[in-house]
Image: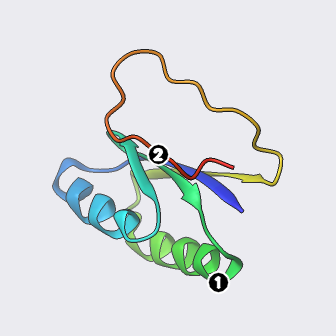
Amino acid sequence: MYLIIVYDVSQRRVNQFCKFLKRYLNWVQNSVFEGEVNVAQYELIKHKLTQMVGKDDCVIIYDMGKCWKKRMVIGNEKNQISNVV
């Protein structure tokens, strides 16, 4: 499945979220990650993010499933991705 994860967390924990998500997904912009994961990785990511999130934090996970068709970047891309489905 293809995921897009965006987050808005307290400044002191931004690096913690970034470091964790880099293990599984591609960092495409500040606080935005995307990539292909299997079901076990998806469940692990959801579980860990649930533990990490604070009362004023927000994490949004877009599960694109298999319907992902096209990705277009306008401007300077931070990290090129070659595994878009």
Coordinates of residue 73 in the picture (x, y in percent): 50, 23
Tag shown at residue 40: 1
Q: x and y percent of residue 68 in the render?
A: 75, 43
Label 2 and label 1: CA atoms lie apart by 22 Å
Looking at the rendered structure, the secondary structure element under dot 2 is loop
Give how far across and how far down residue 17 sits, in percent. Answer: 32, 62
Q: Amino acid at mark 2?
A: Ile
**Which residue lies at the image location 25% right of the left edge and 54% below the top edge?**
14
Expressed as whole percent of the image width and height from the top left, the position of residue 81 reads 47, 45
Q: Looking at this view, name the residue that lies furthest to the left.
A: 12
Q: Tell me if residue 38 comes above or below residue 14 in the rendering.
A: below
Quadrant showing the N terminus: bottom right
- What secondary structure is marked by label 1? helix
Q: How dense is the environment of label 1, judged by Cα within 10 Å: few (below 14), some, or many (20 and up)?
A: few
Q: 25 left or right of 4?
A: left
Residue pictured at 50% horizontal, 53% vertical: 59
The vertical placement of 77 against 14, above or below, is above
**Residue at left offset 56%, top offset 53%:** 83
Q: Could you tell me which residue is drawn at 58 percent across and 78 percent down?
A: 41
Q: Of the numbered discs in the image, which one, if any, rests on residue 81? A: 2
Closer to the camera: disc 2 or disc 1? 2
Residue 53, image quadrant: bottom left
Image quadrant in which you'd find residue 39:
bottom right
